[in-house]
Every structure is written in C-alpha cells, then in structure tokens.
Amino acid sequence: MVETLAQSPAPICWVVSDGRRGIENQALGLAEAVQAQLAARGSKLRIGRVVAHKDSSVALPDCGPPDLWIGCGRAAIPLAARHRRTFANGFFAYVQDPRGHYRNFDLILAPAHDRLVRPNAVAMIGSPNRISQTLLDEGRASFAAQIDALPGPRAAVLIGGDSKRFRLTPRIADYLIARLNDLLAENLSLMITVSRRTPKALCERLAETFGSHDRVWLFDGEGENPYFAFLAAADWIFVTEESTNMLVEASATGTPVYALPMDGSAGKFTRLHAALEGRGAMRPWLGKLATWTYTPLAETQRAASVLIDRWQAETASPALNDGEAA
C-alpha cells in the first residue's frame, strides 16, 4: 500500500552521546532546531535519546530506527560506524570534529575555530545549543517566584572549571569572589551556577560567602536546574572564558555577555572569542558595566537549515516536504 502524505509516519531522529549534559545538549539542540523548522513546514520529527555508557553498553530508544542520526562526543563515533551498517538508509550527522572518521558521516557541523576543511563539513561559530525563545520563556516561567524575589537589575554568573587549556586556580577563585562582591556593591542581584568542573573548594567558598545573601541565588546542582531561567532573567551574563558552550549559549540570548578570565591560554579558542566579540555579543570584563544590544547568535538554526537541505537532497521521504506527517 502506498502511503499518502498524511499517513506516512514522522521521521525519527536519534540523538547519540555519552549522556553528559554538555555533550548531549549539542546534538539535542541541533535536533530540536531541525524539529522546529520541520514543524514550520507542517512536518513532524520524533526524537529519541541514545546513550553510550562507560561500560560499553548502549541504551537505545523505543521509537524505532533512525531516519536521522545526530551524534556528539567521542562515544558516538564508533556507534556511527556500527549504526551505518544497520541503518543504511539513515542520514548521519556529527557535531564537532570526528578526528579522522569523516567517512562515517553525511554531514559534519564543526566549530569554525577547528578549521576543519572537508567536503562534508560545514563550519559554524561554536557548537549547536538548545537556546530558543520558547525554552527561555518556559525556564523563566518555571522559576518565576524565585526570580521575582530577586530585585533587578540581575546578572547571571556561569562558572566552569578546569579544562585542557585553563585552570580555575586559587588565584582565580579569589578574583571571582572579589568580582562578585563588586557586582553586589553595584546593587545587582546575582544568579550564580557552577558546573561539574568547578573545584569543590570554590563551591564551598561561594556557599559560605553568598549562600545566605538576600540578593544572591546560588545553584549548587541540587534540585531542578534553573540554568535557562538564569539566562532568561539576566540583564547581563558573566561566563568564565574556558566554557565555550556557555559562552555560545549566552550569546544566543541577545543579552550582553562578559567573559571572566581564567589562568591559561585560549589557543585556538581565541578565534571563537574573537568571533563572539566581532558579532557584538561578548566583551572582556574590565570592571565597568555597560549596556548594549546585538543580534542573538543563531548558528544552531543555520546549521539545522543546512542539515535539512542536505538530508532532503539525499532522501525521498515525503515527511521532509511541505505538508503534515502524522
């Protein structure tokens, strides 16, 4: 039986990662942007989550085989080779540089600062993310009472930690504590969040110094994560400079972004910082608040458009054409 457009099933997208939030959100953000753009065309996309665990086990979704496969992180690379053999009709995309495994993918969305040049690679500023106006509005609504309890203006402070190129040393910890006190002295309210990479000693100092302050909301990882609410409610966003994901996510909001220094050298990430500064999104923190506007970074949406075009060119699926799929 030949299916009509209304009868044909919605295509399925597998989001493949090791389950770490920072890795998974890149692939998930791209999948959600594809989903939104297909929805605008009257089509649907179902998203399933695939997690490659450290013990080599793999958790697969129950939504059926993938028409679209989007992976991110090292754990996704060997799975792509296996899944291509099993799901030969799928379209395989990868976020970041797969480090030599280029033939496993139909499309690679690589950060421009990696300078990857391949026929199947498209460069973008930073990496895909989940930031959208809908997600920001939902985040703010979920924490409306807590946000309203903080008098404005407000600053979100996103603190990372050690990376390959940077260290959050005791000297930097002292610097961050001092700068946060400076912002409080400017009558700002602070919404502070730490990451898994933030040193325990700094987390303890933040709790001791600001945990009971009536103009500070310190999220320490316990309970529901207000990250998107922080981004939505902020008049300024401060981000430690090593966190490329958080810098790009902050730059997707349209809110002024300040980079906080760390010990180390940016290396190739200097190119990312320059790109964000060139777009008017980010400035180095020099101790004086300013207000400015810029066009929110929309690289995820651009990458999704490229992916849909490439996918559509290689498939005859009616669900990718204009019209509604059930």
Image: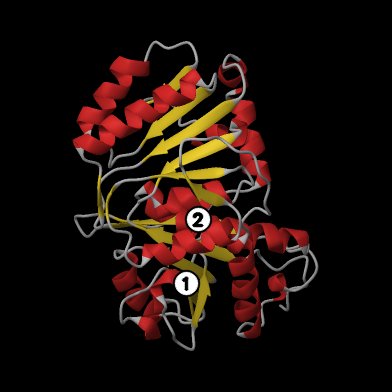
**Is 61 on the left or on the right of 206, as rendered?**
right
Mark 1 residue type: Ala
Mark 2 or 1, nearer chain start: 2
Mark 2 residue type: Leu
Total marks shown come to 2
Q: Residues within 10 Å of mark 1 (few under 14, many from 20)?
A: many
Q: Residue at x 61, y 24 (%)?
A: 153
**Is 6 on the left or on the right of 25, as rendered?**
right
57 w.r.t. 118: above or below:
above
Task: Identify which residue, 22 or 296, lies in the foreground.
Answer: 296
306 w.r.t. 301: above or below:
below
Displayed quadrant of residue 255: top right
Q: Taking the image as drawn, is residue 314 in sight?
A: yes
Q: Residue at x 56, y 64 (%)?
A: 12
The circle drawn on residue 28 is: 2
Q: Position of residue 188 (x, y in %)?
A: 54, 22
Q: Are marks 2 and 1 in contact (CB under 8 Å)?
A: no
84 w.r.t. 125: above or below:
below
- Residue ranking furthest to the bottom: 119
Q: Residue at x 21, y 55 (%)?
A: 54
Please state, as top left, top right, bottom left or bottom right, where the N terminus lies in the image: bottom right
Q: Position of residue 108 (x, y in %)?
A: 47, 76
The circle drawn on residue 112 is: 1
Q: Position of residue 215 (x, y in %)?
A: 50, 15
Alpha carbon distance from label 2 to label 1: 20 Å
* Mark whose residue sits in front, 2 or 1: 1
Q: Residue at x 61, y 46 (%)?
A: 253
Task: Identify which residue, 50 or 61, lies in the foreground.
Answer: 50
